[in-house]
Image: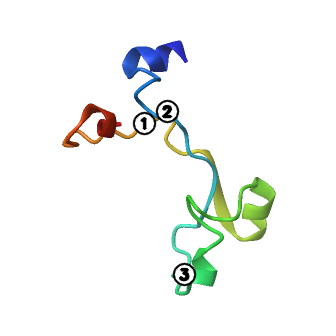
Amino acid sequence: MNELDARIPLALGHWHSHRNICVPHKGSPPLRTHAERAPFGFEGSITTRTACDAAGGVFLDNVYGWMTHVYPYAPTLAETF
């Protein structure tokens, strides 16, 4: 946390990581309906490797590492992070 705080203070940035994501295999048929897409991706319902394997997906335990979102054109400092 000290290293993250040195980069962008914890009081400003909302540091987080995207973990336990299941995505379809590359080359899989397109997911055409909401019901087909719902289990996969950042907002998907599949959050374990076992469930992802059963669905024929690829399990990503940590997608980007630690990150925070920065909006450099926000009108105020409070809205920048």
Measuring 47% from the left and 20% from the top, which residue is drawn there? 4
Label 2, secondary structure: give it: loop
Tell me: 8 left or right of 32: left
The answer to which of 70 and 41 lies nearer the viewer is: 70
Disc 3: which residue = 31
Amino acid under label 2?
A: Trp
Contact between marks 2 and 1 (CB within 8 A): the answer is yes
Disc 2: which residue = 15
Amino acid under label 3?
A: Leu
Residue 66's place in the image compared with 35, above or below, is above
Name, please, the residue furthest toward the bottom: 33
Label 2 packing within 10 angstroms: few (<14), some (14-19), many (20+): some
The answer to which of 8 and 75 lies nearer the viewer is: 75
Tell me: 68 left or right of 46: left
Nearer the observer, disc 3 or disc 1?
Answer: 1
On the image, the x and y values in percent for residue 1 come to: 55, 18
Quadrant holding the C terminus? top left
Q: How far is the residue under mark 3 from the one under mark 1? A: 29 Å
Disc 1: which residue = 68
Residue 7's place in the image compared with 30, above or below, is above
